[in-house]
Image: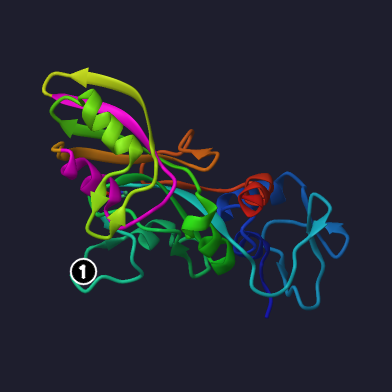
Amino acid sequence: MKQRLQKLIAAAGLASRRQAEDWINAGRVTLNGRVASLGDRADLEKDCVQVDGRSLEAGQPRVYLLLNKPVGYVTTARDPQGRSLVTDLVRDVPVRLFSVGRLDLNTDGLLLLTNDGALAARLTHPRHRVAKTYLVRVRGALSSEARQRLEGGVELEDGPTAPARISRVRLAGSHTWFELTLYEGRNRQVRRMCEVVGLPVSRLKRIGLASLNLEGVRVGHYRHLTAGEVARLKRL
Ligand code: URA
């Protein structure tokens, strides 16, 4: 079935439809060897569509998105309580995506969405110790004893936590901000760890995952990972 080129390019995970339209207008896209125009349609089983000289493949494309999740969205595929889903924020990507790991309803920040199950499994498996960095605000002051416990491992009901790293500690009135890097990912782990040391979390944002961060991505928006970023994640 023939489809508009911008739709095919977006479905291949290379760009949003809007970006793809810009690429077509800029002459970066060819259809069967000729520079394509906006409105052209193609069937990847029969036609050759190239972006910057590289062909789009037929078949299910892999898509990798970095979303800046807002508070108030759930990361599950559906929600019986009818709350907003993170996939609502990527509706213009015509592929079924799921999130890599979870963020709580009240946690915002960096979330990967993909349809690449193998990569998602690698990134979430504790064996690979993928770094996840959170900006945390707790009620109270972070004593050196609490810091040592959080970094060294605390006992949770599902077992002791692995060594973690704390940096950029800043006291602000009755609260403390710090960055906490974990190398595992259990359900509500940051909140539970902080609770155990007597520091209830009042704000939680994921700001890093492996070498990725939120730079340039506004809350509620997403960007496609570059081919280099995907390759780096696959090497982890
Ligand atoms: N830890 C938590 O407690 N919540 C999250 O959403 C992520 C990590």
In the rendered view, does 231 fall on the left or right side of 114? right
| Residue at horizontal 27 percent and vertical 45 percent from the top | 154
Bin the neighbour count of mark 1 within 10 Å (Cα to Cα): few under 14, some 14-19, many 20 and up. few
| Residue at horizontal 30 percent and vertical 22 percent from the top | 169
Quadrant hosting residue 5: bottom right
Which residues fall within the magenta stretch? 175-197
Q: Is residue 105 above or below residue 166?
A: below
Q: Is residue 172 above or below residue 24?
A: above
In the rendered view, does 36 fall on the left or right side of 62? right
Label 1 residue SS: loop
Q: Position of residue 141 (x, y in %)?
A: 16, 24
Q: Is residue 17 above or below residue 212?
A: below
| Residue at horizontal 75 percent and vertical 68 percent from the top | 57
Is residue 177 highlighted in magenta?
Answer: yes
Q: Amino acid at mark 1?
A: Gly
Q: Which residue is mark 1?
A: 82
Q: Position of residue 78 (x, y in %)?
A: 31, 71
Is residue 178 highlighted in magenta?
Answer: yes
| Residue at horizontal 38 percent and vertical 56 percent from the top | 89
Quadrant hosting residue 35: bottom right
